Image (cartoon, rainbow, N blue to C red):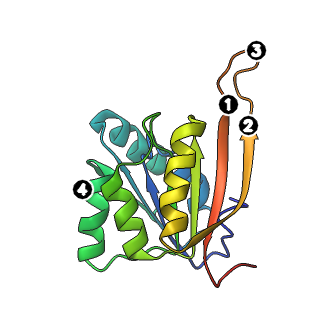
Amino acid sequence: VEYAGLTGNETVIDAYCGIGTISLFLAQHAAKVYGVEIVPEAIEDARANAKLNEMKNVVFEVGASEDVIPNWKEQGITADVIVVDPPRKGCDPRLLETILAMKPERVVYVSCNPSTLARDLRVLEDGGYKTVEVTPVDMFPHTVHVESVAVLVKCGTEK
């Protein structure tokens, strides 16, 4: 939430949203949140979680992020912030292209694989974003696995 820099007026897209954990947390601080996940059962759970928590400013859709988010863009949905939490293989190249085309003010990237994080940050930086901060999170002590959370801002909008 801190990296998203939300004031309550933003529209957020949460790619690879799973059961909506990040989406619902962000929705408490945003005007509207759109979540997308390829696993239908996860979206059923996300919708149930939204209903259980009486959150009406969240929309969840089943599908691949690289397919659904370009469709949202075609429908006129824009995002001030895009959050991605991809699998170990990182973001699909088509999703990265869509992020660059949508030009959100901020991108928050949650990663479980430092090498694909670095690869995807390079693409976003080459497309006009600046990585402002990356925080490692050791959720699995005594293993080689480290989560990371990065925030990127559109060049010219650093604060």
- The answer for how far apart the CA atoms under marks 1 and 3 are is 10 Å
Percent of width and height locating residue 94: 30, 57
- The answer for how far apart the CA atoms under marks 3 and 2 are is 13 Å
- The answer for how far apart the CA atoms under marks 2 and 1 are is 6 Å
Which kind of residue does numbered mark 3 sit on?
Answer: His
Label total for image: 4
**Residue identified by numbered label 4:** 67
Percent of width and height locating residue 57: 47, 66
Percent of width and height locating residue 52: 49, 45
Q: Is residue 23 left or right of residue 62?
A: right
Q: On the rendered image, what quadrant is the N terminus found in?
A: bottom right
**Residue identified by numbered label 2:** 137
Q: What element does badge 2 sit on?
A: strand
User: Which-is-in-front pick, marks 4 and 1?
Assistant: 1
The circle drawn on residue 146 is: 1
Which kind of residue does numbered mark 4 sit on?
Answer: Asp
> Mark 3 or mark 2, which has the lower sequence index?
2
Q: Image quarter for residue 43?
A: top left
Q: Are dots 2 and 1 in contact, CB under 8 Å? A: yes
* Crowd tier of the residue under label 4, counting other residues whose Cα lies within 10 Å: few below 14, some 14–19, many 20 or above: some
Residue at 64% x, 24% y: name it.
Answer: 145
Residue at 40% x, 75% y: name it.
Answer: 102
Q: Is residue 55 something that shows in the picture?
A: no
- The answer for how far apart the CA atoms under marks 4 and 1 are is 28 Å
**Residue identified by numbered label 3:** 142
Which kind of residue does numbered mark 2 sit on?
Answer: Val
**In front: 130, or 139?**
130
Residue at 35% x, 66% y: name it.
Answer: 98
